[in-house]
Amino acid sequence: MEQTPAKTRSMIIALGCMALGFTAMSVPARAQADHSTMDHSQHGQSEHVMGEHVMGHGEQKFYMHNGPTKPGRNYTASIGAYDVSSVQLVDQHGKAHDLAQILAQPGPVALQFIFTSCATVCPVLSASFAQSIAPMTTLDPETRLISISIDPEYDTPERLLSYATRYNAPENWMFLTGSLTEVRLAIKAFDALYESSNKMYHRPYTYLRAEPGKDWVRLDGLLSKAALMNEFESVLQHRAAARQ
């Protein structure tokens, strides 16, 4: 039997190792794809929807909508008048607040719903705030940013404070949590979740308002700093035009 030259044997071994390497590298991606369609009935949820992730703690489960692949590439804007009645919440320092009273204070407001253990949408939402808060405050020193946790069973004031520190949040960026009942009132007031009998979907909403009594602009999508600043400047311009 003809012997395979040593050089040829070395090439065969190298190619075999590369093939094994590619196979091993493909396993996590395959496993991730399988996970994206797995049945979450053990949590009382129906089958998971492709492109979304189940998150939350205890009985409070959320299906996070991923939004576009890259921030600022694709989002929609709509105008809404949201009636926020008395909602009792607590900030990252443990201080109690009435959401309606917070929103009644003068100045522009940017608001998002997040939760600290989210690994998909919320970090992008919070990063857009972190990158934009300084120029937003320069445009109007009364600007306030508000992030409300939709997972209050896990997000204590201490966890919100740690989260705020992670994003170097200044004093005019408030993080709020509270009882599940009160948080759901806030969610309902801003029409932030689609809720059915067995699941909830959280979309990447950002809300902008020029001053108390004005309509809100709701942005649906993951925003770059440039996109968020363009929308914020537009809100301020409409306020200025209305005052003339």
Image (spheres, rainbow, N blue to C red):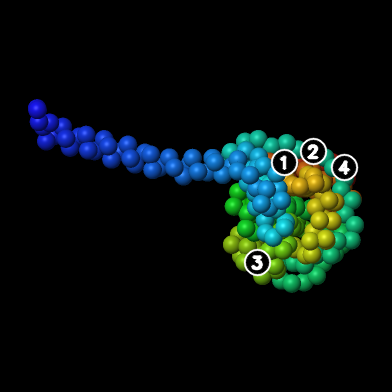
Q: Residue at x 32, y 36 (%)?
A: 19
- Amino acid at pointer 3: Arg
Q: Is residue 67 visible?
A: no
| Gap between marks 2 and 3 measured at Cα | 32 Å
Dividing the image into 4 quarters, which one contains the C terminus? Answer: top right
Q: Which residue is mark 2?
A: 78
Q: Specify the quadrant of the image occupied by residue 149.
A: bottom right
Contact? badges 1 and 2 (CB < 8 Å): yes
Left or right of 118 in this view: 214: right
Dividing the image into 4 quarters, which one contains the N terminus? Answer: top left
Q: Which mark is residue 220?
A: 1
Residue 59 x %, y %? 72, 58
| Gap between marks 1 and 3 measured at Cα | 26 Å
Q: Which residue is mark 3?
A: 159
Q: Residues within 10 Å of mark 2 (few under 14, many from 20)?
A: few
Element carrying mark 2 = strand
Q: Residues within 10 Å of mark 1 (few under 14, many from 20)?
A: some
Contact? badges 1 and 4 (CB < 8 Å): no
Q: Which residue is mark 4?
A: 242
- Amino acid at pointer 2: Ser
Relative to 108, residue 174 above or below: below
